[in-house]
Amino acid sequence: MKDYLKWFITGSIFIIPFISFIVINDMFFPFIVGKNFAFRILVEMMFGAWIALAVIDEQYRPKISTIVKALVFFVAIVGIANIFGANFDKSFWSNYERMDGYITTLHLFMYFLVAGSVFILPKRWDNYFNIMIIVSVILGFIGISELIEADFQIGRLSTTLGNAIYLAVYMLFHIFITVYMLFKDEIKEWGIRHFFYIGAILVQVLNLYATATRGTVIGLIGGISLTMLIIALFEKKHIKLKKVAMGLIGSVVILVSMFITFRDSAFVQDTHVLARFTKISLNDSEGRIEDRFLIWGMAYEGFLERPVLGWGQGNFPYVFNKYYDPRLFDAEPWFDRAHNVFFDWLISAGIVGLLSYLSIFVALLYLLWRIKDEDMSFLSKAIFTGLLAAYFIHNVFVFDNLVSYILFFTVVAFIHSKYIHNKEPDTLKRDTRNLPAWKSFSVDQSQHLTVVTIMGVITLAAVYMLNYPAYAQNKTLLSALYFTPGRVPPEQVITGLDLYKKALEYDSFGNGETRERLLFHAQSVYGNNTVDPRVKAEFMQYAAEEMSKQIDEMPGESKYPLFASGLFSTQGNFAKAEELLQKARDISPKKDIVLLALGDVYLNSGRAESALVVYKEAFESTVINGKARNHKAALRYALAALYIGNDQLANDILIQTFETHLVDDPPIINFYVNKERFDVVRDIYEHAIEKENDDPKLKKKPEYRFQLAGIYLKLEERDKAIEILEQAMLDLPEAQFPAVHSDAKKFIEQIKTGEI
């Protein structure tokens, strides 16, 4: 029985590295959900088997170490923080997009307990690391094939992990683990194994480089440098190794210096990845470095409000909404992470939670360097110290995900196991102060089958209850998304509504995302003329009911009342839309898209003066040194000014923002058309066309030429209309714009004959 359990647990652990390949396209968030469900189910099954094994055989019961104490402290503090946080359900279950939360924290802790207790033999860890390396090489070749297929113009590589940052940290861990496997034993003669490791490292480094993830690359450089520095300063036995380390440190310094010196060279600037590294500054428009500092500032404000235990896991949106900085107007509107692991833990569990997280690193380093030299070489300890440093640096710029969590907890389990167990597996280090109480009890062999049976039943029940409702809801949600107008016949659209109802009946942690998709689906149905009005009404009513529930369940997130307001605005129910937007504004007073949506409701319901006030607030919140940055707010503000008859204010706003009052914004153009101010419309179109002709980078808009011709007809300047169309045929080559030439000729003929 013990053998069966050991092989089942070991086999389950050995499967975990292959989770990286899982991409299930028929699930909502295909790169995230499948991996997480697979990990949870594997851990639940191996954990149940391990409990049975630990009951049967004391050798596999958990041994106490400083790492175990740190992890227990961390898990306990985070759990307490979640209980007293802003939203316990969100903290515990998370959502489909992240699949994080306390449920994942508990699974990671269970994974640590199992791996750290069952992997007693050093050979078992070697086998596990080799499997991990092989998987990383396969994943690396997938990445290389994608690069070749895209002629190395792929942008940022992500492979089956779906995110360049996830792939970067994945390769970061594997680089150090592979280096450890290469040098863990003294190399007396080079063999195939060693060359395989060297090849694996090259593949891993290439993939990490192709992710263009700057924080991770800096982490790699920092980790390698620290490893070499430790060897250069403290290695005593191997003088040659000491000299190599000093040489590598010098090489790193030279390479970094050369990069800084030649950062503006054509070679660097023409290489996408290298060019990204030259843009590490507050003015980096591509990498959004400024945004990170703004978000960290908001996170700090949130920490000050709840400094001890924070807001609970997954509740950063509450902080993001409450302390939103308007300077983020052109960034992603709904950040759910601080993009810094340490700020994330400050928000999730306060200063106590952050200290508990940092205590894991302290415990790891403490035990790592207490492992006897005969159990782990000085070089190996230096390599893992470098890995922890590299991961720490990486975490300054990003947030964790399942892949990085698994790899980190694998390293934690490995160091714990190395410290606890001697090379002889049957000889456990015994410390009477740390001897667990469970060492004293034993189970008779006749009861082994009973123990296994009971744990089997409990485990299967847990696997079903913890995973099936959310899994089924996810699949049903994706099926519902298919039944949109245009994709299916009008009579089948109602099937989508039935599927949404079925999905929400599962009542899992995916309710929020299901309701969100339902709302957008309902608006799509409502705007389609081919759908039965009764189906439209049923869709809209059900969506409104479910969004009302979502607003009540997530009172600190402004996006739900904002989204719901769109539902009522679409129907012309501006009073209800305003009510919801005021609620969203109370939650996030400075959120620009909330202010703009509220202004739209005022404007569409004939309250231009009220719209002007709200638009002005959104506009002025991003004016820096007299320069308006929020173009969308500027256009709305100017439009409201036109509606109240203040043309001078409108022109001033547009000039301040665009350096001209002739801006080709459709709502502004429509305003002038409706007011029959065709002379202004003419000037706007002429200015836009002139800009296109002066700047070859601008995309040509043939419709502007035809619309300008139409305006000239309104102004009774028929010859000018013909002239514009003839010029359009000269500006826009027939080979590229055949429709323009045929339509222009037809239009000209109709003008000449008087048909129009």
Image: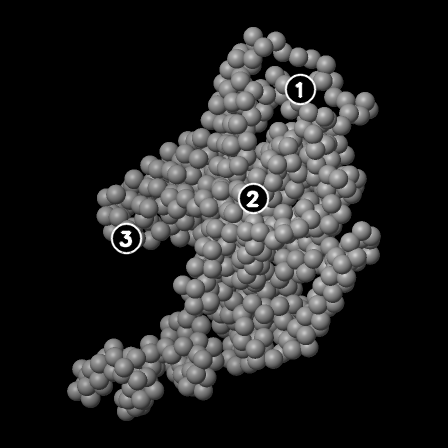
Residue highlighted by disc 3: 486
Q: Amino acid at mark 3?
A: Gly
| Of 567 and 69, the residue lying toward us | 69
The local secondary structure at tag 1 comes to: helix
**Quadrant of the image occupied by residue 618:** bottom right
Residue 18 appears in the figure: yes
**Residue displayed at 66% across by 73% down:** 259
Q: Amino acid at mark 2?
A: Asn
| Of 632 and 274, the residue lying toward us | 274
Residue highlighted by disc 2: 130
Characterize the local packing of mark 3: few (<14), some (14-19) or many (20 or more) Cα atoms within 10 angstroms.
Answer: few
- Which comes sooner in the sequence, label 1 or label 2? 1
Q: Amino acid at mark 1?
A: Glu
Residue highlighted by disc 1: 58
**Residue displayed at 47% across by 55% down:** 141
Tag nearer the camera, 3 or 2: 2
- Which comes sooner in the sequence, label 1 or label 3? 1
**Disc 1 to disc 2, C-alpha distance:** 28 Å
The local secondary structure at tag 3 comes to: loop
The local secondary structure at tag 2 comes to: helix
The image shows residue 88 at horizontal and vertical percentages of 61, 34
Characterize the local packing of mark 2: few (<14), some (14-19) or many (20 or more) Cα atoms within 10 angstroms.
Answer: some
Characterize the local packing of mark 1: few (<14), some (14-19) or many (20 or more) Cα atoms within 10 angstroms.
Answer: some
The image shows residue 208 at horizontal and vertical percentages of 57, 58
